[in-house]
Amino acid sequence: MVNQLIGTSLEFPSEAQIQRLRIYIKQTWKTLYRSHKHILEAAHDDKLNHEPGTPWIVYISPQENQVEIEQALQKAVPKSEWHQIELRVLPSEVDQIQEHGLLYLPHPYVVPGGRFNEMYGWDSYFIQLGLLRDGEVDLAKCMVEQLLYEIEHYGIILNANRTYMLSRSQPPILTPMILALFQHTQDHEWLQRVLPLVERYYYYWIVPPHLNQATGLSRYFALGDGPAPEVVASEIDEQGKTHYDRVQEYYRHCTVNAYNVDLYYDHEQDTLTDLFYKGDRSMRESGFDISNRFGPFSVDIIHYAPVCLNVLLYKMEQDIAQIYTLLNHDDMSQQWQQRASDRHQRIDQFLWHEADGLYYDYNFQTNTQCRYEFATTFYPLWAGIASESQAAAVARSLDRFEVAGGLLASTYASGNQWDAPFGWAPLNLIAVQGLLRYGYKQDAERIAKKFVAMVSKEFEKTGTIVEKYDVCRCSANVSNEILFGYSSNEIGFGWTNATVLEFLHLLGK
């Protein structure tokens, strides 16, 4: 557990400091912008080894007209760059891909920043909020259209548009993006057009292997096998050890009680098992890479029904019901409302812990809740699924998570970046919006002020906004505290920018 610093806070930024933040964020949307013109920049990938002098590969969906796309790209890309790109048609099977590359998308989009130079699944929701708040409505619409294109041409919303991420998705937050855009456009024909793709993506999550039939709840479960290529190539420490090397060392010397380590590590051979890599990839599908929320390195995630995923699916069911209502199909709306109601009941049955007043992930292998305190306990408030008494209990838990710079991801320090002492913009935003929904305005505003003050303080020092923060020390200097995965703190940064804008709006700034 970490020391709580709920009473300690930074001075809120001045109007001039806020203005500097706003200017940086507005300019950064352009820095993070990718279009046909920027295809070479988009294809560049720091997470994989690339032989100098060889072209970057861009894969086109086999459903597309390769000649038309090539002609369109040639018109947009400077001649001096064209020879540095190689277009290929994506093979029909993922295991046929010999060399990894960028997956073509037809519209402009915004990347998170730093080493994350591609369009991500759940990042895009927060980025879209920031774009809408900043008046970039056309670009916000493109973000949604790109995700719909991924469903149509690549089967799912991808973790990100790289070939090595074709086998996993990310937390499903598509329908809030659609409804947020609809508020601006009121385009009912567009809603009608996108609905079949939304439902297609929904079924990815509610059939095996993502469905756990015993509980009726869903789990994260990536479809790929073996080590994640980007981890092997780029998550290397000063001693030349990869993340997986460090995990093996941990298993070699440490006792694990959270799960049966024999499932994931062969002591005799000193090797990670095939199931380890399945769990590792599934943890990356969750977006929370890495914490100890599902045991060390979250590798046991494949045996859990997580709070975050099932609340997001409840929200998706509610949103699809709302879309059907907007399209005057009340009978279909009622069917989707019933699905949401059924999931609500299961969430209360399996994920709510009355005595602790928190929502916990459920291990369906051991039939027990994992009482690992994690900020996803605020998701049910954000989605409106909590009762008034449940919301009050979760709000009373704030002192476990709240520190000087906002909310901790978890109350445990593990050496992983999604645990203490780190805090992340999306978790702070979801918690604040959830608290506001149930009338806890004073708490919500206090957390928002803390987070903005911390981001502003570090921005004044470095001139950048970053991916994550040590919210106990109110610092962007986090690398020495992260022992596993990648230890860098990426500059940009899409979801932090968006959260700052949302919080400034909330605070009337």
Image (cartoon, helix red, strand yellow):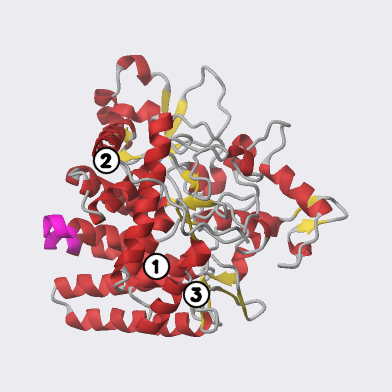
* Residue marked by disc 1: 312
- Magenta span includes 186: yes
Please state which of residues 44 and 369 is positioned toward the viewer in this rendering.
Answer: 369
* Residue marked by disc 3: 359
Residue most toward the top? 80
Left or right? Give the position of 18 relative to 252.
Answer: left
Disc 2 vs disc 3: which is toward the camera? 3
Q: Which disc is residue 113 wearing?
A: none
User: Dot 3, crowdedness within 10 Å: few (<14), some or many (≥20)?
Assistant: many
Q: Secondary structure at mark 3?
A: strand
- Kind of residue at disc 3: Tyr
- Kind of residue at disc 2: His
Please state which of residues 106 and 502 is positioned toward the viewer in this rendering.
Answer: 502
Please state which of residues 120 and 50 is positioned toward the viewer in this rendering.
Answer: 120
Residue 155 visible within the image: no
* Magenta span of residues: 182-191
Residue 69 rendering spot, x and y as whole percentages: 29, 34
- Kind of residue at disc 1: Leu
